[in-house]
């Protein structure tokens, strides 16, 4: 069905198409059984103190204001991450700010953390009963005078209602945000966040989302800080604002974060490096160019325990999680592997 309506949808600019998708998902009309697959228990995994029915998650950036995460879970995703959520409502960057690079299987966005703000989103999540695992991605407002304080407020706000909280230090579209990759600044931030957790006596998992544009020498320092500060998982990676050399689309020079197929190998290589450095002490969530069972399996074999996608969802449509699950199960059967967890890091 999606292949039939895709040309019609892609006639709209990307943000209009996204808004139409959010409004359609609010009707919540598709039965969950449509997206179940046979032998899905082969994909189940226990992590972060949770049971994930499968490792295929939807990354932050699609359901920015936590409007449709239950409908998304019904599409077969093992978990959904909402946000990025900032303390105050934020309109984001001027439009146009999302670009389809169809020839490259990619997107470029410079949305700028547009969302409804903590209070609205907190109430929205509190009023709904989650039908699956829902994480909240937090970040600072564009014009804040204290980015660390914004992160602390985000953590306090979602401590008791999120299944996990992601500290987003990696968007290329918020000035100064990636400065938190500096090990001293990152350590100060994580100490402050853990102090809040300890005071509240709530053991919500803290995840750290990393840029793909870091240097190799940053890997050991970031890993060391993450280990020292009880980070529960590292998400690799966010979008890149470099790596444009091989793009052929007319939108290739647009400013913003590049996602999709061009990020596939970059993020997979970074997963391998972090996996070796972390030595299985912190699990990895792999992101970047996942749109098939093979691309998903490659990231798992590189060291990812869970996966997230976004651009693949835009290009492949609402059955993408189901299709990836079916492909993964077939790959596992062919390889003689009983459960997906046995493939993690198998090519390192």
Image: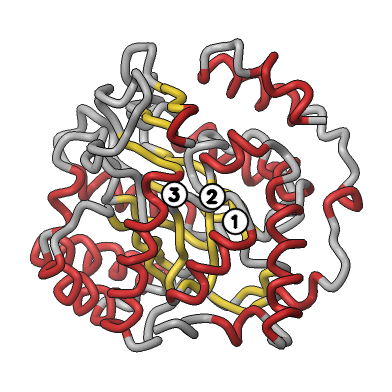
Q: Position of residue 209 (x, y in %)?
A: 35, 57
Q: Residue 122, relative to residue 56: is it above or below? A: above
According to the picture, the residue beneath numbered tag 1 turns out to be 57
Disc on the earlier residue, 1 or 3: 1
Mark 1–mark 3 Cα distance, whole angstroms, equals 13 Å
Q: Residues within 10 Å of mark 2 (few under 14, many from 20)?
A: many
According to the picture, the residue beneath numbered tag 3 turns out to be 137
Q: Residue 348, relative to residue 80: is it above or below? A: below
Give the quarter of the image for residue 328: bottom right
The answer to the question of whether label 2 and label 1 lie on touching residues, with beta carbons closer than 8 A, is yes
Give the quarter of the image for residue 326: bottom right
Disc on the earlier residue, 2 or 3: 3
Q: Position of residue 126 (x, y in %)?
A: 64, 46
Indicate which label's residue lies in the foreground, 1 or 3.
1
x 40%, y 61%: residue: 235
The quadrant of the rendering that contains the C terminus is bottom left
According to the picture, the residue beneath numbered tag 2 turns out to be 309
């Amino acid at each position: 069905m999606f292949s039939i309506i895709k040309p019609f949808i892609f006639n709209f600019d990307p943000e209009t198409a996204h808004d139409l998708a959010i409004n359609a998902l609010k009707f919540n009309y598709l039965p969950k059984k449509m997206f179940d697959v046979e032998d899905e228990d082969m994909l189940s995994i226990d992590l972060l103190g949770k049971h994930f029915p499968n490792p295929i998650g939807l990354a932050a950036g699609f359901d920015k204001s936590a409007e449709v995460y239950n409908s998304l879970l019904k599409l077969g995703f093992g978990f959904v991450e909402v946000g990025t959520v900032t303390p105050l409502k934020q309109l984001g960057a001027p439009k146009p700010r999302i670009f389809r690079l169809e020839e490259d299987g990619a997107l470029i966005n410079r949305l700028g953390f547009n969302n409804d703000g903590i209070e609205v989103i907190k109430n929205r999540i509190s009023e709904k009963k989650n039908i699956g695992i829902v994480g909240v991605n937090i970040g600072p407002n564009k014009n804040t005078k204290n980015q660390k304080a914004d992160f602390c407020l985000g953590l306090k706000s979602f401590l008791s209602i999120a299944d996990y909280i992601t500290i987003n230090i990696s968007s290329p579209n918020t000035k100064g945000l990636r400065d938190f990759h500096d090990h001293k600044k990152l350590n100060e931030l994580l100490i402050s966040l853990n102090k809040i957790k300890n005071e509240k006596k709530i053991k919500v998992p803290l995840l750290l989302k990393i840029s793909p544009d870091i240097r190799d020498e940053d890997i050991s320092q970031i890993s060391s800080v993450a280990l020292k500060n009880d980070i529960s998982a590292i998400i690799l990676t966010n979008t890149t604002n470099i790596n444009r050399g091989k793009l052929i689309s007319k939108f290739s020079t647009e400013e913003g974060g590049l996602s999709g197929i061009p990020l596939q190998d970059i993020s997979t290589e970074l997963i391998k490096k972090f996996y070796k450095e972390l030595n299985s002490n912190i699990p990895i969530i792999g992101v970047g160019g996942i749109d098939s069972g093979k691309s998903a399996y490659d990231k798992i074999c590189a060291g990812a325990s869970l996966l997230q996608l976004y651009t693949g969802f835009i290009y492949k449509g609402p059955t993408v999680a189901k299709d990836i699950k079916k492909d993964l199960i077939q790959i596992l059967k062919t390889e003689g592997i009983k459960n997906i967890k046995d493939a993690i890091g198998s090519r390192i």
